[in-house]
Amino acid sequence: MLVAGVRFERAGKIGYFSTDLAALHPYDQVVVKSAKGLRLGRVVVPPREETQRAVEGKVLRKATSDDLAQQAENRKREEYARKVCLERIEARKLPMKLVKVSYFLDARKACFFFTAEGRIDFRALVRDLAQRLRIRIEMLQIGVRDEAKLFGGLGHCGRELCCSTFLVDFAHVSIRMA
């Protein structure tokens, strides 16, 4: 079985997907079907024969101009969804910080990434958003290091943050190490 490595975010984890397309090259944009839905990603590991690796879905095709146009349209939807979500968070006085909104390629579902001190009951917020945006909503709580990874920045050394360039997994940090 041919398996290709695809990344969805600049410094995100590499997902491995089965493919029938042997002519994929690094930096090719592809449409991937995963358990969560259709996504647009970038090939980082060209297809190769693998039998041991677990796959997360399938590469359907190279991205077409329609797919890229849909992704651009989704960026506009994300801006609107972010505005609506911030309104609803403020109206419901929820102690959370919205970090990012990400639509899936088919625009049927969106993920809202947020940070908060503890656990938040956001069921009413999800209902509000689903009613207003007319899509499926997924809320994901992330940590502050994940937030730094999404936004980037400069570290103490003066270089770009390691987590936003090459670190994929975060090791646990004890209080003594911090």
Image (cartoon, rainbow, N blue to C red):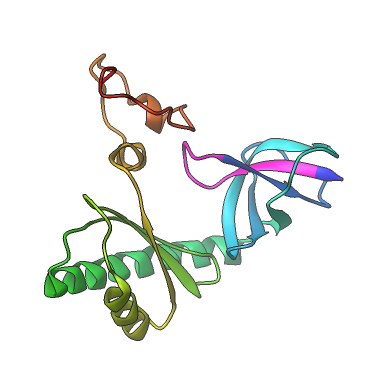
| Residue found 47% across the figure and 27% down from its top | 166
Magenta residue check for 2: no
| Residue found 61% across the figure and 39% down from its top | 27
**Quarter of the C terminus within the rendering:** top left
Residue 168 location, x and y as percent? 49, 32
| Residue found 21% across the figure and 58% down from its top | 96
The front one of 8 and 112 is 112
Residue sitting farthest toward the top: 157
| Residue found 79% across the figure and 51% down from its top | 19
Q: Can residue 171 be seen in the rendering of this structure?
A: yes
Residue 169 location, x and y as percent? 48, 32
The quarter of the displayed image where residue 151 is located: top left
Taking 104 as reference, is 46 left or right?
right
Residue 119 location, x and y as percent? 28, 57
The front one of 2 and 55 is 55
Taking 57 as reference, is 154 left or right?
left
Residue 38 location, x and y as percent? 60, 64
**Quarter of the N terminus within the rendering:** top right
The front one of 85 and 80 is 85
Whether 106 is drawn above or below 131: the answer is above
Magenta residue check for 5: yes
Q: Can residue 24 be seen in the rendering of this structure?
A: no
Whether 76 is drawn above or below 160: the answer is below
Q: Which residues are magenta?
A: 3-13
Taking 101 as reference, is 66 left or right?
right
Q: How many marks?
A: 0
